[in-house]
Each structure stands twice: as structure tokens, then as C-alpha cells.
Image (spheres, grey):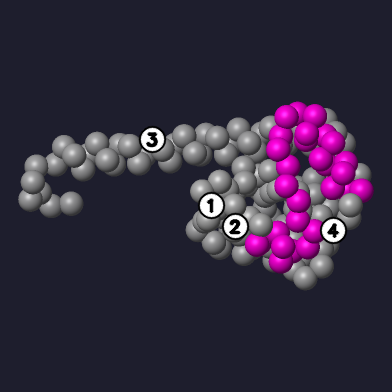
Amino acid sequence: MLIADDNLPNCELLDAVLSEQGHEVAFAHDGAETLEVASAAAEQGAPFDLVLLDIMMPKLSGYEVCQRMKADPALASTPVLMVTALHETGDIEKAVDAGCDDFLSKPINGVELKTRVRSLLRVRHLTNERDRLLAYLSEVDDREKPPGAAA
């Protein structure tokens, strides 16, 4: 799980809640670093299961990071939970338009954070299972075609 926030106390709070649940956590402290860390993990075959992304960060905003992640095939399926002090309807709409999967306003409620993380991780797991099953079915289908059959 990747926590992207430029505010150290926010990182420590999120880490405390998530580590208590047994989650391994990595950190990024600006938008550009978030993309670098997420891309590097995906390239190594170990993409993050979830990114908790602050909106107001240096270099690139959370909106920009989310848009770029969702446009990158290697990162597009990574769920993004926007965690921010912004709470106006327009902010939420902009986050959704950027491709975020869920939105959580600060100050953080630990129970709400745990519940949203659990739900997003469950969706991620089911999506991974579906993708593995579809790949397997495609493989089986390819093996059962007679030689020279049209694809």
C-alpha cells in the first residue's frame, strides 16, 4: 500500500491505522515521487494494492497523479483512495473525474478508513482473480482449437 502525502503527521497517522491492520506501507511525499514509486513497483511485478493519495501536494496534485495513473496500463487497475482536507462537492467531483475509486475527507475517522481500505482491497482481489481466470480460459480455449483454425 502506498501513502502519498506531503504532511508527515498525516503519513504517521495513516501508517499507524493501516499497520495495525497488518498492511505493509510505503510512502511518497510529492506527486512526482508518487508516480515514480508506483511505476517502479509495477515494473518489478509487485504493484501496490492501493494508493492513498492526498490532493494538495507539491510538484503534481493528487488529481494529476490519479489521472496519470489511470492512463498508464501498468497502474490503471490500482485503486486510488483520495484522502484530503478538501470536502466541497466540486472537489469530490474533480477527484472522481480524475479517476479515483473512493474519497475520504480529513480529519480521518479510523473506522471509516479501515472500512474503505478493506472494501477497495476486496475489489482489487476480486479483479485480480477475474483477470487470472480469464487468462486461464483464454489459454484453454487456444489449446483446444485445431491446428490451422482461425482465431
What segment is highlighted magenta in the picture? 9-36
Which dot, 3 or 2, sits closer to the camera? 2
The mark nearer the N terminus, 1 or 4, is 4
Locate residue 138 relative to residue 28 in the image: left or right.
Answer: left
- Mark-to-mark CA distance, 2 and 1: 6 Å
Residue furthest front as drawn: 44
Whether residue 84 appears in magenta in the rendering, the answer is no
Mark 4: secondary structure: loop
* Residue occupied by mark 4: 6
Locate residue 123 relative to residue 118 in the image: left or right.
Answer: left
Locate residue 122 relative to residue 87 in the image: left or right.
Answer: left
Whether residue 94 is visible here, answered yes or no, is no
Residue 115 place in picture, x, y as percent: 74, 31
Kindly indicate whether the residue at mark 2 contacts the one at mark 3 (C-beta within 8 angstroms). no
Mark 3: secondary structure: helix
Indicate the amino acid at tag 4: Asp
Residue 52 against residue 17 in the figure, above or below: below
Indicate the amino acid at tag 1: Gln
Residue 101 against residue 59 in the figure, above or below: above
* Residue occupied by mark 2: 40
* Residue occupied by mark 3: 133
Kindly indicate whether the residue at mark 1 contacts the one at mark 2 (C-beta within 8 angstroms). yes
* Residue occupied by mark 1: 44
- Mark-to-mark CA distance, 1 and 3: 22 Å
- Mark-to-mark CA distance, 3 and 2: 26 Å
